[in-house]
Image (tube, helix red, strand yellow):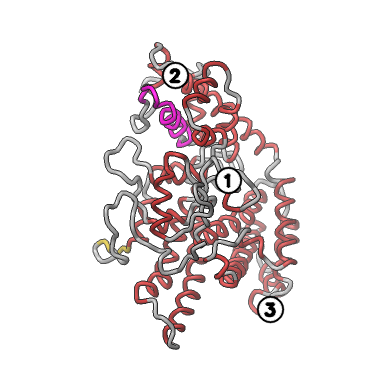
Amino acid sequence: MEKMNWQRLYSPLRTGAAAKAPAQERDLNVRTSFLRDYDRIIFSSAFRRLQNKTQVFPLPGPVFVHNRLTHSLEVASVGRSLGKAVGDDIGAKYAAAGASGGEGLGEDFSEFYKYELPSVIAAGCLAHDIGNPPFGHSGEDAIRNFFRELDGEGKRRFEEELSENQRRDFLYFEGNANAFRTLTHNFNEQNLGGFKLTYATLASIVKYPSDSLNGFDRSRLVTKKSGFFDSEAGTYQAVARELGIPQLEEGKQVYARHPFVYLVEAADDICYRVIDFEDAHRLNIISIDTIRELFLAFFDDVQGYGSREKVESTLNGIVDDNQKVSYLRAMLINHLIFRVKDIFMEKEELLLEGKVEKSLIDYLPARELALMKKIDAFSVQHIYNHRSVVEIEIAGYNVIGGMLKEFFGAVLNPKSVKSEKLLQLISKQFVITGKPGGLYSDIQSVVDFISGMTDLYAVDLYRKITGMAFPQIR
């Protein structure tokens, strides 16, 4: 298998672009190509809608907890730090190789890794949840279950008119693949390329570079889930060709992971593990003593500024319990950033060979990995199965399942009076053709419409179309 190389992995070519852009494309001499990616995401309506999408706990409520937007912003902050730490090391390593007589990689290489990699990783982190439907991960489950439980005419047409790969796009609906679609698909616009992000940023969010047909095979990390739908397979092929990402098996849409993916994934892994505890504490689900016990243990073997003695001394000087949790959160995130950076550099060759089969967090030293698994076990028992979390998951099943029933039925029978009315509610951005051979794209439009909703909009529309609430004239 062809080995990836750092010099090729950061192409600034964009989706929808006809030719390769300059490596340091600038806007008014201020923004580079990769900074523009970050800006395009953060100013988008798809990103803003994350402010009303569930992260873990229901919202809104009397106590502010993280939503998908605040989570993504915090992941981007951690990702930027990881990108800076890794980029400095890569830049220094290959600059030194050139100075000592080795092959120099040029000014663009040095500029990118020293100054641009943080922007790429931060942009990837901003976008990593942009394809997630309302109501957290239960939203994904609700979409999958709806299509798995089809019967009658709907099931017959679904099975006859869609290929196996297309069917699996819905039967195994995946927010990661939907993020790639959201960022690259032009929907009903004439201008191709979607957000027109650079290939480097797009590749950094594809955690499972496989189509639905070959995905969901847990024997390999790259096929644990899927990273792109049948409709975006050609787009990912173009990204992989440009960046030199090898296809793992001839004739199958399965690729090696881009090394930057591991940094975006690590930033997310660090944040949700640590910050979910902060939310749970504010909701009085877990105590400060529990957090102290679980978090402080990470500093037992640290010397100097980050030693347990120093951390505990500062902690004991803080009065407010919420501020204590915030301090512990900050110290643990900082500790894990440097752990992950070291792991990334230790595994540099394996990353370039596409042979790293676990997330970077899973390569923590044995003692710290055991502590992380203890956090995971506690989270599952006391946070992710808390009554409020289960209630929002059930609501997600009912609301999303109910809307899919109505709109999928309308797609199957678009000429009925009710169907015509229902289809008028779907934004013109999502085209329903009603044409023979167009069922796959029509179902995608329905799923695009529903998965892009905020929690509150989904509940509001569900109530109205089912007659549970009467619309007001406005």
Q: Earlier in the sequence, mark 3 or mark 1?
A: 1
The alpha-carbon separation of the residues under discs 2 and 3 comes to 64 Å
As measured in the structure, the alpha-carbon distance from the residue carrying label 3 to the one carrying label 1 is 40 Å
Q: Which residue is mark 3?
A: 303
Q: Residue at x 75, y 56 (%)?
A: 374
Q: Which residues are magenta?
A: 433-452
For disc 1, the marked residue is 225
Q: Which residue is painted at 74% across and 71% down in the image?
A: 300
Above or below, comparing residue 231 to residue 92 in the picture? above
Amino acid type at circle 1 is: Lys
In the displayed structure, 66 sits above or below 260; it is above
2 or 1: mark nearer the eye: 1
Q: Position of residue 59 (x, y in %)?
A: 56, 39
CB atoms of marks 2 and 3 within 8 Å: no
Residue 233 figure quarter:
top left
Tell me how far mark 2 sits from mark 1, CA to CA: 30 Å
Residue 463 x/y as whole percent: 51, 22
Most frequent secondary structure within the magenta stretch: helix
* Mark sitting earlier along the chain (2/1): 1
